[in-house]
Image (cartoon, rainbow, N blue to C red):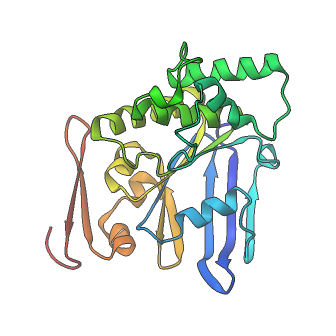
Amino acid sequence: MEKTEVVLKADGLSLAYGGRVILENVNLEVRQGEFCFFLGPNGSGKTTLIRAILGALRPRAGRLWLHPDLGRLEQIGFVPQRCDLNPALPTTVREFVLLGLVGIRASRKEQTDRLEWALSRVGLEGMVRCDYWSLSGGQRQRALVARALVRRPTLLILDEPTNGLDLSTEDLFLRFLAKLNQGEQLTLLFVTHDIAIAARYATHLVLFHSGTVESGPRHEMLNAASLERVYGVGVEVSYNRSGSVAVRVHSAGGPP
């Protein structure tokens, strides 16, 4: 897939649970190689749109189009907020990562090749036989990513994967994802409510508010007016010379 190709597109998309409409008239495009952040407060519809992309929720109206390479979902990797595996169940890193191949037919050799490729991309090579539960928090997050990468996806979706990580581990994990995005030209959809990490790592933003979205390149979307529409308060984002991000919140209409 070429870098400029559209990976997914929504036209007038509406999503609902029964009679309760969550998102309405959603229009957006995501292109190959973007590091796209879904940004908005809890309950604004971020996970609902992800469920639709994964095929778990049918549109109420409008159209959600996926690139033909993503049609059977084999080329989509998904990293959930947490691992629901029973910690009492002994599980090696190999066993854990290969769970990502569910639904994909692969010979034993192909499984091994995919496993080695995925672990090398997340920096866990040589840990195939390690107990998953012996890993650090950051290593477990990398293993979750490897479980998605073993599918060799074109699109990787991450649903608030930094929840529960300390600041240093979160920073290392996000740097790793940025390197993966740039090195593999992998398209990433990253769901979060954290403005600071979106400001630092996103190439594009999808802002969720008032039952719909607005989207575009980060430098166009990350402004006080857009963020006030999303959060209902004034938000000021600034960068210092080291590249770190400062986020200041003030009352709507008030001074920063």
Q: Is residue 153 above or below residue 107?
A: below
**In which image quadrant can residue 253 be found?**
bottom left
Residue 256 position in % (x across, y down)? 15, 67
What residue sits 38% from the left and 75% below the top?
229
What residue sits 59% from the left and 31% below the top?
146
Residue 28, can we see it?
Answer: no
**In which image quadrant can residue 116 be found?**
top right
Q: Quadrant of the N terminus?
A: top right
For this rendering, which residue is in front, 143 or 67? 143
Residue 44 position in % (x across, y down)? 48, 71
Residue extending furthest toward the top: 126
Residue 254 position in % (x across, y down)? 16, 77
Q: Is residue 91 above or below residue 209?
A: above
For this rendering, which residue is in front, 82 or 26? 82
Left or right of 196, for residue 68: right
Q: How many marks?
A: 0
**In which image quadrant can residue 236 be found?**
bottom left
Left or right of 247, for residue 94: right
Left or right of 203, for residue 149: right
Residue 119 position in % (x across, y down)? 58, 22
Q: Is residue 86 above or below residue 256?
A: above
Residue extending furthest toward the bottom: 19
Left or right of 124, for residue 71: right
Residue extending furthest toward the left: 255
Residue 145, can we see it?
Answer: yes
